[in-house]
Amino acid sequence: MEKSLFQFIWKNSARYQVAILLVTLLSYPVSYILLDLPKTITNEAIQGSNFPVEFWGVQLGQIEYLAVLCILFLVLVVVSNCIKLYLNIYKGRLGERMLRQLRFELFQRVLRFRLPHFKKVSSGEIIPMITAEVEDVGGFVGEAFALPAYQGGMLVVQVGFIFMQDPLLGLAAISLYPVQGYIIPKLQQKVVRLSRQRVKNVRVIADKVGESISGISEIHSNDTSAWHSADLSDRLYRNFRIRFDIYNRKYFIKFVNNFMNQLTPFFFYFIGGYLVIKGQLSIGALIAVIAAYKDLAGPWKELLAYYQMTADVSVKYQTVVENFDPPDLYDKQRLLEDETLPLSGPLTLDKLGLSGAGTGQEVHGVSLIVEPGKPLAVTGIDGSGRAELLQMAAGLLSPTSGSVSVNQTSFENLSESTLGRQIAT
């Protein structure tokens, strides 16, 4: 699987992401006109005096001109909200589609695990990873490229509009952004590390609870309830400390961000008021700038939240993927349906060996030939490697040395459909 979350998203949804970006581009001119229209209404339609005016080749009086501009404003509001509605629905559907695909791919990888790997992992770890831990990934997929494109575009449009009214007000609007852009990522790095610890700790808690439920009889018969309770209590407290540390840092980041956002209007009122008093800026332009800055806070806040969300979801994705990518994973072709190869002839085990597979039993140098239709019994005490030998003969377990074959066709090269239909039966 792709190690990077963005590689996974782009590989599986590139054309959908491009469609979202194209629709996003349509919203930029609409947003700019919506910022400029209130200034035009205030300065020209309400405070203007040169009437009638020509509007698209038609002569309009003051009331008619005001009505036309207000109707145009209302139409653009409807268009802008329709674009947002379409994007939200499209992103939500894309996210659910990708979440379904990711869960299916993870389950397919479980089916490709070799048998010894199941000795190292438990269902208590695998099930939460496929169901709960990737839930946020689905919600993020639709936002991965669309949110920075939309909110970043809105930020550029609004800052550009403010600069068009007055360069000093434009500089005031962006004066604290470099500080926020430096401080907040520094604070977020520790939150990312803590999030990774939390995911791993929750996974261990789920595994411990699963073990306790499956071994409840042994727990009661050996009087270990108190020990298991103390062990789980310790892990729960560790999870509490991690989450508490995350909350402290996240809310401090929010405090710094909100403080800096509320500090900027001071420059607007002071500098803008001075320019209006000196006659260098109209009151309509100042009102439009203040309104634009209120809208400006939204995209900037969304971009910072997006950065935090990206870090958090990337940690979850990477933590999950690393558990579904063992080095000895079966090739995906093994699960594909193919034409069942006709196997005939003796079953040949040639210097078969198994060691270090996590089963606890080892097999060394087994060679034999089983003729079709002839009975064969494999005997041995528990732990002698008897079960492992039969699993290798059935193609369920891969030997570390030697080979299992029928008519010189190695089981390692056969698909599951061939093994299941001709060997298992």
Image (cartoon, helix red, strand yellow):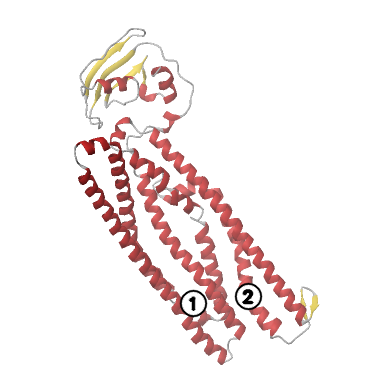
- Callout 1: SS: helix
Q: Quadrant of residue 424?
A: top left
Q: Nearer the viewer, residue 346 or 219?
A: 219
Residue 236 placement (x, y as % from top left): 28, 53
Badge 2 density bin: few <14, some 14–19, many ≥20, Cα 10 Å: some
- Callout 2: SS: helix
The C terminus: image quadrant = top left
- Number of labels in the image equals 2
Residue at which label 2 appears? 36
Query: Please, what is the three-letter code of the amino acid marked with disc 1?
Result: Ala
Please report the residue visible at 63 percent of the width from the left and 71 percent of the height from the top.
34
Q: Quadrant of residue 277?
A: bottom right
Residue 101 placement (x, y as % from top left): 48, 42
Please report the residue visible at 23 percent of the width from the left and 38 percent of the height from the top.
220
Q: Nearer the viewer, residue 196 or 205?
A: 205
- Calculate the distance from the C-alpha at mark 1 to the C-alpha at mark 2: 17 Å
Q: Earlier in the sequence, mark 1 or mark 2?
A: 2
